[in-house]
């Protein structure tokens, strides 16, 4: 698929966000993975702010603990916090050169093999609801075109998050964000249950959840909730390894 | 993960995690980190 076709797919998917049964967490994960492919980078993630202005990792291109830690560190100092507070993009930030600016984050990101980072604000008119974080393990900067594409993807993510209900803007922001963050917690709980049940990594557990929700045409967060509370509807996922759906991506 | 190890619901699992952290004088986050990294399990009886 050409870049243009992939971009078209990403924007068409946003139209789906206007449909009732829409699964925002699944959408954000797909978007994060699309960023990685489209922009030829190594990892991406979306952070959303709660009512206290604390950023939370809501979706990432890979579900490994080290990457998620790199998001959490940015609540002290990091590109996402800067982008969120200033509503301005942080681009082509070389980690080594930004040691003073983001001491803990730069060190941890470098230790994970990344060389440069970018953070694009998730904007809705005058509000910023979070940031899209991009990580590169190779040298070389993102072009202006790449940055524009990245910002467009950040903007569609914002539309997707806020598109579901027809509420007054202030209510909309806090309700939607709280729902997205609550869903995140449920998914984390389900990952833990599956990881322990089947003795697999949390990344593999997440792939199992995604594959199951896709195969059964159910929302990711609904499946996760069933797993977390051990509902009978999640029996197949909680059953012995052999009868569970095979993960489609090993992470 | 703790809920599966102890075969309890999530609320109980959280309570057990907190109790362990308190008893060990460690933060909940630290203990949780150990559980996820599989350095600590909750299904063997501790002395």
Image: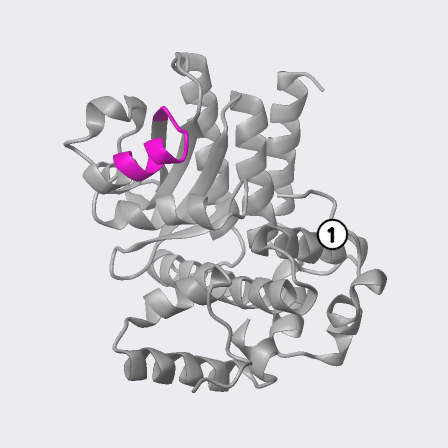
- Point out residue B14 in the picture as x, y percentages from the top left corner: 44, 80
| Up-down relation of residue B32 to residue A40 (above or below) | below
Inspect this view and state whether residue A17 appears: yes
| Residue A107 belongs to the span the image colors magenta | yes
What residue is at 44 percent from the left and 35 percent from the top? A154
Which residue in the rendered view is the most extreme toward the right? Answer: A243
Which range is magenta? Answer: A106-116
- Point out residue A153 in the picture as x, y percentages from the top left corner: 49, 32
Location of the N terminus of chain A (image quadrant): top right
Location of the C terminus of chain A (image quadrant): top right
| Up-down relation of residue B5 to residue A153 (above or below) | below
| Up-down relation of residue B15 to residue A27 (above or below) | below
Residue designated by label 1: A211
- Point out residue B38 in the picture as x, y percentages from the top left corner: 51, 63
Inspect this view and state whether residue A120 appears: no
What residue is at 50 percent from the left and 28 percent from the top? A42
* Nearer to us in this view, A144 or A159: A144
| Residue A220 belongs to the span the image colors magenta | no
């Amino acid at each position: 698929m050409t870049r243009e076709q992939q971009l078209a797919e990403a924007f068409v998917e946003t139209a789906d966000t206007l449909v009732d049964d829409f699964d925002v967490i699944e959408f954000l994960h797909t978007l994060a993975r699309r960023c990685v492919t489209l922009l030829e980078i190594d990892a991406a993630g979306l952070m959303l702010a709660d009512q206290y202005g604390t950023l939370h990792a809501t979706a990432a291109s890979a579900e490994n603990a080290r990457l998620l830690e790199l998001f959490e560190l940015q609540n002290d100092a990091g590109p996402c916090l800067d982008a969120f507070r200033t509503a301005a993009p942080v681009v082509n930030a070389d980690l080594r050169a930004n040691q003073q600016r983001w001491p803990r984050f730069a060190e941890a990101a470098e230790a994970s093999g990344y060389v440069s980072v970018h953070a694009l604000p998730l904007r809705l008119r005058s509000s910023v609801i979070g940031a899209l974080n991009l990580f590169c393990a190779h040298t070389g900067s993102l072009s202006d075109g790449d940055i524009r594409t990245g910002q467009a993807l950040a903007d569609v993510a914002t539309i997707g998050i806020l598109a579901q209900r027809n509420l007054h803007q202030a209510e909309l922001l806090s309700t939607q964000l709280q729902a997205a963050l609550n869903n995140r917690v449920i998914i984390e709980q389900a990952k833990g249950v599956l990881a322990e049940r089947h003795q697999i990594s949390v990344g593999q557990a997440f792939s199992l959840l995604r594959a199951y929700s896709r195969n059964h045409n159910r929302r990711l967060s609904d499946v996760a909730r069933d797993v977390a509370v051990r509902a009978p509807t999640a029996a197949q996922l909680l059953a012995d390894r052999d009868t569970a759906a095979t993960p489609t991506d090993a992470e | 993960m703790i809920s599966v190890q102890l075969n309890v619901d999530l609320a109980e699992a959280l309570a057990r995690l907190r109790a362990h952290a308190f008893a060990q004088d460690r933060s909940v986050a630290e203990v949780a980190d150990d559980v996820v990294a599989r350095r600590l399990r909750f299904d063997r009886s501790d002395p």
